[in-house]
Image (tube, helix red, strand yellow):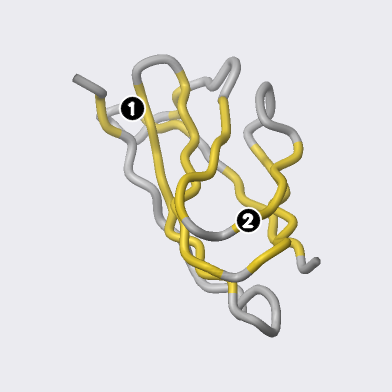
Amino acid sequence: GETKVFQVSGRDQYGGDYPLENPEWRLEGSCSGDLDPLAGEAETTFTAEGEGSCLLYCREGDLEASAEVDVLAAGMPAPKRLRGRLSSSP
């Protein structure tokens, strides 16, 4: 299937770098595919296997970011700027 690379970076409340030690990636929703790697890297590659919509999550400790992913029948859509927001989980 088509592939797309996703990256995450941490920023503190002042805009400075926030080190990520062991980010964990996961998918939720109706699209199907594989993530590689699932943990330990600030970058993962999504390989689409079936169409649908899902959310891609990256968690580092109590912080989490997400991005919407739509897989079309013809493969992945054209790249666009994706923005994830880090927030504390309750």
How many numbered marks does the figure carry? 2
Please, what secondary structure does the residue beneath circle 2 have? strand
Please, what secondary structure does the residue beneath circle 1 have? loop
Using the image as rendered, state which of residue 74 and residue 62 is in the foreground.
74
Mark closer to the observer (1, 2) = 2
Q: Are discs 1 and 2 less than 8 Å apart at CB?
A: no
Q: Give the residue furthest to the left.
A: 90
The residues tagged by marks 1 and 2 sit, at their Cα atoms, a distance apart of 33 Å
10 Å neighbourhood of mark 2: few (<14), some, or many (≥20)? some
Q: Is 69 located above or below residue 46 in the figure?
A: below
Q: Give the residue furthest to the bottom.
A: 74
**Residue 69, disc:** none
* Residue annotated with mark 2: 32
The residue at the point 19 percent across, 19 percent down is 90
Q: Position of residue 64 (x, y in %)?
A: 38, 31
The residue at the point 55 percent across, 37 percent down is 26
- Residue type at mark 1 is Asp
10 Å neighbourhood of mark 1: few (<14), some, or many (≥20)? few
Q: Where is residue 17 in the image (x, y as percent from the top left)?
A: 46, 28
Q: Is 59 located above or below residue 86 in the figure?
A: above
Q: Which of marks 1 and 2 is nearer the N terminus?
A: 1
Q: Quadrant of residue 77?
A: bottom right
Q: Position of residue 86 (x, y in %)?
A: 33, 36
**Residue 12, disc:** 1
The residue at the point 47 percent across, 22 percent down is 60
Q: Position of residue 21 (x, y in %)?
A: 58, 15
Question: If the image is split into quadrants, where does the N terminus sit?
Answer: bottom right
The residue at the point 68 percent across, 22 percent down is 40
Q: Give the residue furthest to the right.
A: 1
- Residue type at mark 2 is Ser
Left or right: where 68 falls relative to 24: left
